[in-house]
Amino acid sequence: VGAKFPARLYRQWFDRMASSGGPKIRYRSVGSASAQWALIRQTVDFSVSAVPMQPRDLAKVRRGVVQIPLFAGVIAFAYNQPGCDLKLTQKQAVQIASGMITDWQQLGCRPGALTWVHRSDASGITNAFTRSMQAFSSQWSLGTGTLIRWPADNALAAQGNAGVAAALQNKRGAIGYLEASRLRGGIRAAALENGSGEFIQPDAISAAASLRGMQLDSNLAAIDHNPSVEGAYPIVTLIWVLAYRSGNGTKTEAIRDTVDDMLSRQAQNQAAELGLIPLNDELLSKSRAVVEWIGQ
């Protein structure tokens, strides 16, 4: 089970593994929070999550957890406001998401009501987005997590990345946070100020720059949510596979083989083809080094 937005990629991976004689895996797209809960309840062999497990939750898993980065996703400030070439400072980004900016004129565009589009469901994308907002400015007061109580005056809730994309397409004057591989049609992405003061568009090159500067803790979770590396887009989130350190029994080899395959060049190339961000050599090395921690 696992995160929703990369479900298409997982199915491609698992179908290819099965067709080539590898492990046969059943995958359910349930969201990161439910994926972690399933791991804690021991109802799955492994999970995938767009949210790293917190120490308090890791402590609940007596079998231990191996948390391994697989690839990354880019979160855009996506908008539908024709004639507006949007460049957002970090302060403006926080003010938009906090409900402080409600008219496009406040952003230097033609006057018009601004509608904030956000996720209605528990989401790893929301968690990553709000952590970046918190890192951007002390004005951020909504907290972090997979579910947020957003200001309601100018807000519109939508289910999943697909729902946010549809709401943005259908509502002129709308702006929201969206996994960048969903950008299409009339939806554009704002250039966003990074930690170095540059205004950067979300794309594969700027996301790769962000990964180069990403610092990880001992559980391979990112600890820098406002990178200052030159050319780095500032809202990039890793996706992790979560497996047990012990108690895997006869499935140990199959689970290790599955994770090894997801970290292969072929699998990483498939991620890139779908608009996701493959790991660089340094991160791949760190991920591959801990696969052997998945034990019987």
Image (tube, helix red, strand yellow):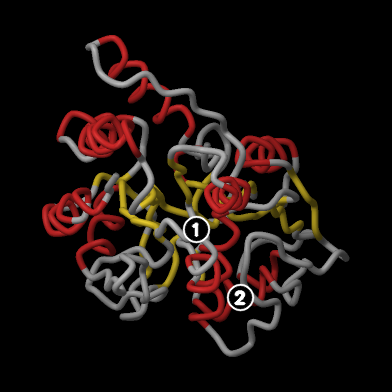
Q: Is residue 56 left or right of residue 73?
A: right
* Disc number lying in front (1 or 2): 1
Q: Which mark is residue 256?
A: none
Which residue occupies the foreground of this view, 276 or 194?
276
- Report x, y in % for residue 246: 34, 51
Q: Residue at x 33, y 68 (%)?
A: 219
Q: Which picture quadrant has residue 231?
A: bottom left
Tell me the kind of residue under disc 1. Val
Q: Residue at x 29, y 17 (%)?
A: 16
Q: Which residue is mark 1?
A: 51
Residue 190 vertical placement versus 248 (above, below):
below
Q: Is residue 265 left or right of residue 231?
A: left
Count all numbered tags in the image, as a single digit: 2
- Report x, y in % for residue 180: 46, 45
- Report x, y in % for residue 8: 46, 27
Residue 155 vertical placement versus 83 (above, below):
below
Q: Residue at x 76, y 57 (%)?
A: 115
User: SS for tag 1?
Assistant: loop
Q: Residues within 10 Å of mark 2 (few under 14, many from 20)?
A: many
Residue 4 vertical placement versus 71 (above, below):
above
Q: Which mark is residue 94?
A: 2
Q: Which picture quadrant has residue 118?
A: bottom right
- Report x, y in % for residue 73: 40, 49
Tell me the kind of residue under disc 2. Val
Mark 1 and mark 2 lie on one chain; the one further toward the N terminus is 1
Judged from this view, the residue extending furthest toward the bottom is: 138
User: Label 1 vs label 2: CA separation?
Assistant: 21 Å
